[in-house]
Image (cartoon, helix red, strand yellow):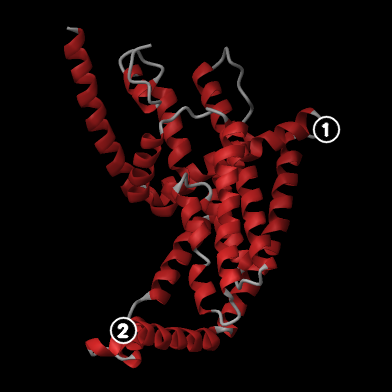
Amino acid sequence: MDREQRLQTICLLMLTTFAGAVALYWLRTVMIPFVLAVFLTFAINPVVELLTRRARVPRPLAIGAVFLVGFLLVPVIGTFLSSSLGQLAENAPVYQEQIARLVRQGAEFAGAERFGLGAEELREQLSAIPIGSTLMRLTNAILGIFSNAVLVLIFLVFLLLGGQRTSRSENAVWEKIESRIERYIVAKIALSAVTGLLVGLILYALGVDLAPVFGFLAFLLNFIPSIGSIIATLLPLPILLVSPETSWVTLVLALALPGSVQLFIGNFVEPKTMGESLDLHPVVILIALIFWGVLWGIVGMLLATPITAVLKILLEQSELTRPVARIMAGRLSKG
């Protein structure tokens, strides 16, 4: 009887997962801003609690102060990013000349003329590659995180105003979710900010164009485990290759130093700071990245890890679904 019950539970979980995925994809226009607001609440709530308990500030005023600081930071970040993008537009002709020179050198080195391919033909073939449109789609996807800012802000205000912390006796499950996810998000934001700042400063010191943009992208991509740090390290490579001022030393340092920062923070600082707060197996995190990336794109990949941690905590609450939670943590035995 117990075996039949477990089989029924597994089948119901599979059907529920499929139906939930369809609903989440269909309702993504509303669900993405709401989920973003929920996790932003976890990030902001500790600051609000600190102001209300230590400084005795009323909760609405504390929330207003946090929003005011956020609104002041947005123009500063926007100014840095817009100035870097303007520099990219000014240097576009120089980049085109550098690309043509690299193509000529590459064609001469490889002896492409023996195969009926001259430098001009190679340049035309390369120009047909939609690099610009690909970068534009990536930029639009990242900016899409902020496209529903008004809706996110509305959800965030209501969640913070009604977000009085519950005691363990009132709702133990929610208190467990709240403490784990809050600890993860606060630590992740702090470490990602340090990573993005160091990457941006290193690239700026080396004279790399778009250094603030690459630092900001390193901050965002650090929320995607493993894959994000690799992408953030390799992102400056096209700009380095097409910039005529870039030497081989600069090229190596612009890849090695940010990569070392990502490696050190991701493999030494982050495990010591965050510990096993989410208790998820790396394979489960990778599957979650693919699943939520298919459903919600880049935003889904950014939120995949904390969402999966919430699901694991919920599965731990039932005896029937507890084995699934143990598998998600990488503990295949019953012990």
Q: Evaluate whether residue 71 shows in this view.
A: yes
Q: Evaluate whether residue 150 shows in this view.
A: no
The mark closer to the camera, 2 or 1, is: 2
Which residue is nearer to you in this view: 233 or 113?
113
Quadrant the N terminus occupies: top left
Q: What residue is shown at x 61% (from left), y 32% (from top)?
A: 272
In the depicted structure, whether residue 217 falls above or below residue 40: below
Q: What residue is shown at x 30% (from left), y 41% (from top)?
A: 21
Answer with left or right where residue 151 lies relative to residue 68.
Answer: left
Q: Which residue lies under the disc numbered 1?
A: 55
Q: Residue furthest top?
A: 1
Q: What residue is shown at x 77% (from left), y 28% (from top)?
A: 53
Q: Which residue lies under the disc numbered 2?
A: 125
Residue 98 x/y as whole percent: 50, 85
Residue 252 x/y as whole percent: 56, 65
How far apart in space, not on screen, are marks 2 and 1 (Cα)?
64 Å
Upstream in the sequence, badge 2 or badge 1?
1
Residue 160 x/y as whole percent: 62, 37
In the depicted structure, whether residue 295 falls above or below residue 238: above
Q: Quadrant of residue 23?
A: top left
Answer with left or right where residue 205 lies relative to residue 236.
Answer: right
